[in-house]
Amino acid sequence: MVPQQQPSGMPFQRYRPFPAVDLPDRTWPAKTITQAPRWLSTDLRDGNQALIEPMDPERKREIFDLLVRMGYKEIEVGFPAASQTDFDFVRSLIEGGRIPEDVQISVLTQAREDLIERTVQSLAGARRSTVHLYNATAPEFRRVVFGVDRQACKAIAVEGTRHVMRFAEQYLADSALAEGGYFGYEYSPEIFIDTELDFALEVCEAVMDVWQPGPGREIILNLPATVERATPNVYADQIEWMSRNLTRREHVCLSVHPHNDRGTGIAAAELGVMAGADRVEGCLFGHGERTGNVDLITLGLNLFSQGVDPMIDFSNIDEVRRTVEYCTQLPVAPRHPYGGDLVYTAFSGSHQDAIKKGFAALERDAEQAGVPVADYPWHVPYLPIDPKEVGRDYEAVIRVNSQSGKGGVSYILHRDHALDLPRRLQIEFSHMVQEHTDTEGGEFNGERIWEIFEQTYLAEDGPVAVLAHRSVHGSGDGADYRISADVRVNGEIREITGTGQGPLSAFCDALAGIDVKVRVVDYVEHSLSEGTDARAAAYVEAEVDGRVVWGVGINHNITTASLKAVCSAVGQAARRGLDRP
Ligand SMILES: CC(=O)SCCNC(=O)CCNC(=O)[C@H](O)C(C)(C)COP(=O)(O)OP(=O)(O)OC[C@H]1O[C@@H](n2cnc3c(N)ncnc32)[C@H](O)[C@@H]1OP(=O)(O)O
Ligand SMILES: CC(C)C(=O)C(=O)O
């Protein structure tokens, strides 16, 4: 019987389930995302305000430049009324001419007149800018933080919007409001996720009545899951409900701003877009308050993995990661989707086996289709995208430790040395590697695996080693192939001769003459490189003194390689005899 789970003793009774939205005819579950939403990076604001050590101006500029290089067109650059440092940073972007013409910067402010004035002042001279105003609308915040009723709460948003417009006329007439400029407005009912939907709608409508969105004059209504408290389907229902009920919808850019408190920020953003959101706000690698804002990198590459252009360049994910780590002074976790160190790496045997077969199948399929592999539809087990697409190489895809099997070990030998081990040799050798990983522990890199392979099969330190050989082909069928070979037998050089149907059987016949009994069970060979000095690998499975073992030979001459493989098998059998009497 399965063991019974026991009550935890945790005080779960203190918590209440999040209310569902009454939306039985919801449409979002049947939608798919077919194009990228508009993105806004709030790394320099929400991301920055949550750092242990907020970024200095140099680090902020690095992030800004990175975001621009990646292709983000809407970038929240700070909270200029918060401090002189924040204000000065915005000024340095504008006065330093660092903002490309096709990038819209935005700044956040509370709905307080003095702060709004300072905020708008910070934007003077910018050709394109957005003011983003917020106030909390959720009942708990109305009651506890602001001590206001619904009407007074709405009035804060409405008055704030009026101030923004007034100060924009005053300070931005020569820049964003001038001919050829663009001045945008964004309003967020903060804690939207906990706000009664009818009230969130009422406040947004009241704000729109002031801003008067229309053709060429959109309003961004941003509906934040300030603290993620529900399953993402609830957020999607809330977004669909707002999208359906807002007036002037065609002039509204509906934006989502998920946080990740329940670990479902990505799902919330994706379902939010399916539910009608046009735009997503988030941070690179999910920086931001507490568990962070939604991660823009995961969202973008999720789209990419579905064949949708994210409209952002992720082709050098490590550069992005290094810059973010430097600027935030926080590490990106090794398992972070798409960007973590280990996310394209398989350690376990069955995963490695499937990946190895997947790569081979991909190459085969592409060749059959007459298409370069890099253009062929990606399908490799366990790898949702081709690591090369984000600037990773295949080096790290398969790494060997005690959890690994033959697939991984032989993949590395193939990758590093072009060896195509026959299946049973893969099994034999992977057991040897496993013996080492079990005793030594840790990870084995390609060099260590090659070292073990060389010691095991190529060392030529067994009882017999072939030094030279001469052969005479017979003319007809039958055992008329004659070989004579100089071999070192237990330290002594001897010439041996034998006959057979080919070099291998003739050599085995010659070995029998010195009492070394070898019967070849299987033989495989392949070239390792092209050209006149091409080398070949020969693999011999042989029964030696009653033991079935493999031997390997590598040489420019394929016959030499095959004789070396036989000697290698003899050496293997001798070692096994010593190891396991
Ligand atoms: C969900 C979010 O991430 S919102 C963005 C949060 N980011 C930040 O707060 C970072 C920058 N903020 C700051 O530097 C400071 O808070 C400042 C400079 C803006 C304001 O500082 P202070 O005037 O000292 O106010 P304080 O920080 O204590 O903020 C709380 C006050 O603002 C009021 N307030 C908070 N949010 C808002 C808002 N959106 N609109 C209007 N008033 C607000 C509160 O009711 C409270 O008022 P009270 O003091 O009369 O009770
Ligand atoms: C200001 C708003 C958009 C915010 O950051 C939040 O609610 O998380």
Image: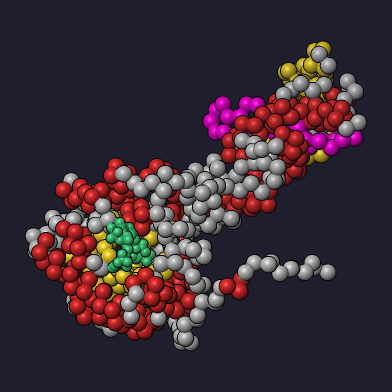
Secondary structure mostly taken by the magenta-highlighted segment of the chain? strand
Q: Image point 20% across, 66% down: which residue? A: 113
Colour scheme of this structure image? secondary structure
Between 340 and 509, the residue placed more toward the observer is 340
Q: Position of residue 308 (x, y in %)?
A: 41, 63
Q: Position of residue 59 (x, y in %)?
A: 32, 44
Q: Position of residue 579 (x, y in %)?
A: 85, 30
Up the image or down, 310 lies above or below 550; here it is below
Up the image or down, 298 lies above or below 8; here it is above
Q: Quadrant of residue 286?
A: bottom left
Q: Position of residue 555 (x, y in %)?
A: 65, 26
Up the image or down, 233 lies above or below 349; here it is below
Ligand 1, what quadrant?
bottom left
Q: Quadrant of residue 329?
A: top left
Q: Say left or right for 418 vs 183.
A: right
Between 27 and 516, the residue placed more toward the observer is 27
Between 196 and 569, the residue placed more toward the observer is 196
The N terminus, quarter of image = bottom right
- Specify whether residue 89 is painted magenta: no
- Specify whether residue 537 is painted magenta: yes
Between 289 and 150, the residue placed more toward the observer is 150
Q: Which residues are magenta?
A: 529-557
Q: Image point 69% across, 32% down: which residue? A: 453
Q: Quadrant of residue 520?
A: top right
Q: Say left or right for 129 vs 440.
A: left
Q: Say left or right for 99 vs 435.
A: left
Q: Image point 61% across, 74% down: which residue? A: 13
